[in-house]
Amino acid sequence: MIGHIESYDPDKQTGLIKSEEKHYTFHLDDWSALVPPESGDDILFEAEGEIARKIDLAGAYLAPPKAVKYKYVAAALALFLGFTGLHRLYLGFYWLALAQLAFTAATVGFGAVWGFVEFVLIITGNINKDAKGRPLK
């Protein structure tokens, strides 16, 4: 069957799939894709009553991810506002951005060094993906 993930709880490793106005529950043990499930993913599965089994992403999602974020925007944010973690926020690493801001506040500005190091890592291509694993443009 074809459906999409309505919700997924990573703590409980369970979720809900909707297909043709019916709902099916699933557990991560029945998930066969290499990436974890996310709400909104289109999937293929086999139904056993109200339980989904042998769940996999639909074919369109098996294509390589397309770049959405710009490398040079992330680099400029890291160089000029790196102490705030804004470049990590731009790339979708929310907790890391918060940690970087807290580090800067706790060390009275030494977080700027962290931002500069990450500027160099972005420019050299060592940081080359956003939080969802998509390459940078």
Image (tube, grey):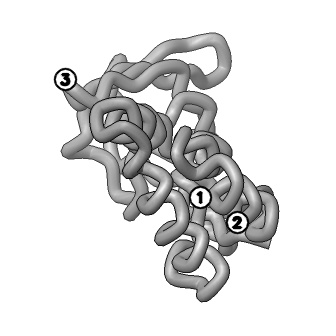
Mark 1 → mark 3, Cα distance in angstroms: 26 Å
Q: Residue at x 49, y 24 (%)?
A: 17
Q: Residue at x 57, y 78 (%)?
A: 120
Q: Residue at x 55, y 13 (%)?
A: 22
Q: Residue at x 63, y 64 (%)?
A: 134
For disc 3, the marked residue is 12
For disc 1, the marked residue is 130
- Three-letter amino acid code at the position of disc 3: Lys
Q: Position of residue 127 (x, y in %)?
A: 53, 73
- Three-letter amino acid code at the position of disc 1: Asp
Q: Position of residue 32 (x, y in %)?
A: 34, 57
**Vertical placement of residue 133 versus 42, above or below:** below
**Vertical placement of residue 54 versus 20, above or below:** below
- In the displayed structure, does residue 119 sit left or right of residue 10? right
Occupied quadrant, residue 1: top right
For mark 2, give the secondary structure: helix
Residue at the outermost bottom position: 124
Tell which of 93 and 36 is nearer to you: 93
Of labels 2 and 3, earlier in sequence is: 3
Of labels 1 and 2, earlier in sequence is: 2
Q: How many marks?
A: 3
Tell which of 102 and 9 is nearer to you: 102
Mark 3, residues whose alpha carbon is within 10 Å: few (<14), some, or many (≥20)?
few
**Vertical placement of residue 6 versus 1, above or below:** above
Asked if residue 101 shows in the view, the reply is yes
Q: Is label 2 or label 3 in front?
A: 2
Tell me the quarter of the image containing the C terminus: bottom right
For disc 2, the marked residue is 75
Q: Position of residue 70 (x, y in %)?
A: 80, 63
Of labels 1 and 3, earlier in sequence is: 3
